[in-house]
Amino acid sequence: MGTVGTSADEIAAGERRRLINVAYRLLGSVTEAEDAVQDAYTRWYGLPRRRREEIVSPGARLTTVTSRICLDLLGSARARRERYVGAWLPEPLPDRTEWSHAGAGGVNVTGRAGPAASADPADQIVLDESVTMAFLVVLESMTPAERVAFVLHDVFRYPFAGIADVLGRTPAACKQLAASARRRVSVARAPVPATGRADVVRQVKEAWETKDIAALVALLDPAAVMTADGGGMVGTVLHPLEGGARIAQYMVAIADRAPGLELLERSVNGAPGLVARRGGVVATVAAFDVSDGRVTRIWAVRNPEKLRPWEREG
């Protein structure tokens, strides 16, 4: 059942960080991921103590329950998205190590300064290629079953036998679902190294600050697409903006309408991005996809509810 002398509840409690990582990749929402994990723990502690101690692998049990909860949420997400004002984008994640310095306790496993783990679920999510905005957007194109099968197997190496228990299908069927999802992911090219992306994003920042439309056009792919998520709470384009020239003009128009806009280079979901701040308040978090030295995609999140993890930006 685990380490001798360790109770099932202690083992279960140690699974929270991993479960939040699973749930965020399945849902693309920090808030929903935390709620799903909390629901899973509520069900866990709802079992009689003797029954909990009989469970051989509390981690596997909690992963199954959390994944089922996420599957149900994904099933209802399409209807919610239809009511959503404008485009829906995943919640962007900050990297606290960029604007927090390690204290005497050093940097802990969550990447935050100090000896204690953060209570903020956003700080507990591992920033790697499986949480980049480009990757999460591809996950959004999958069916709920494909997404669960792919994330659990390809990202977290969960066995198909366990995935079958989550999806209520045979292991062979789950393997086919993961393969189908994998084909969607393979359409995307290999990511540009972080240093290359950072250089391009820095040049975009400089051109944006100087309102240099010609420089922006040169940095944007002619077929570039910008998608913005305001959730109906703040003004933004409701539909994807296509074309490098149109995007450049729009970016300069934004700068003209928002004097005092401060642009900061920050990692967004583990990749180079930009944060726009006005009056000390984070107004926009932008993620970029880069190919051949040019920006091909911009995802700009402006919905204040999705920017809560960035409130401590400084």
Image (cartoon, rainbow, N blue to C red):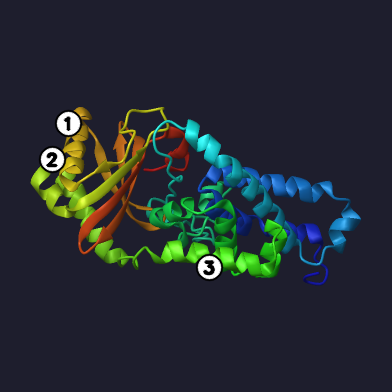
Category of crowding for the residue at label 2, using alpha-carbon neighbours closer than 10 angstroms: few (below 14), some (14–19), many (at least 20): some
For the residue pair 137 and 58, the one nearer the viewer reads as 137
Q: x, y (%) of residue 2?
A: 78, 70
Q: Name the residue under label 1.
A: 256
Check disc 3: other Cα within 10 Å, few if <14, some if 14-19, many if 20+: some
Q: For residue 263, which quarter of the picture?
A: top left
Element carrying mark 3: helix
Give the residue displayed 80% in from the left and 65% down from the top: 6
Please tell me which residue is depicted at 38% across the width and 64% down the height of the picture: 187
Q: In the rendering, which numbered label is found on residue 179?
A: 3
Instruction: Report the residue marked by disc 2.
Output: 211
Q: Which of disc 3 and disc 1 is earlier in sequence?
A: 3
Q: Which residue is drawn at 55% across and 41% down?
A: 77
Residue 93 visible in the shown view: yes
Quadrant in which the C terminus appears: top left
Q: Which of marks 1 and 2 is nearer the N terminus?
A: 2
Residues at marks 1 and 3, CA–CA distance in whole angstroms: 47 Å
Say what amino acid the circle numbered 3 marks.
Ala
Counting from the top left corner in percent of width and height, residue 241 is at 26, 41
* Comes first in the chain, label 2 or label 3: 3
Instruction: Give the farthest residue toward the left.
Output: 214
Q: Is mark 2 on a helix, strand or loop?
A: loop
Apparent side of residue 147 relative to residue 10 in the rendered image (left or right): left
Left or right of residue 196, residue 180 in this image: right
Closer to us: 151 or 115: 151
| Above or below, 207 relative to 62 | above
What kind of element bears circle 1?
helix
Circle 1/circle 2 CB separation < 8 Å: yes
What amino acid is labelled 1 in the image?
Answer: Asp
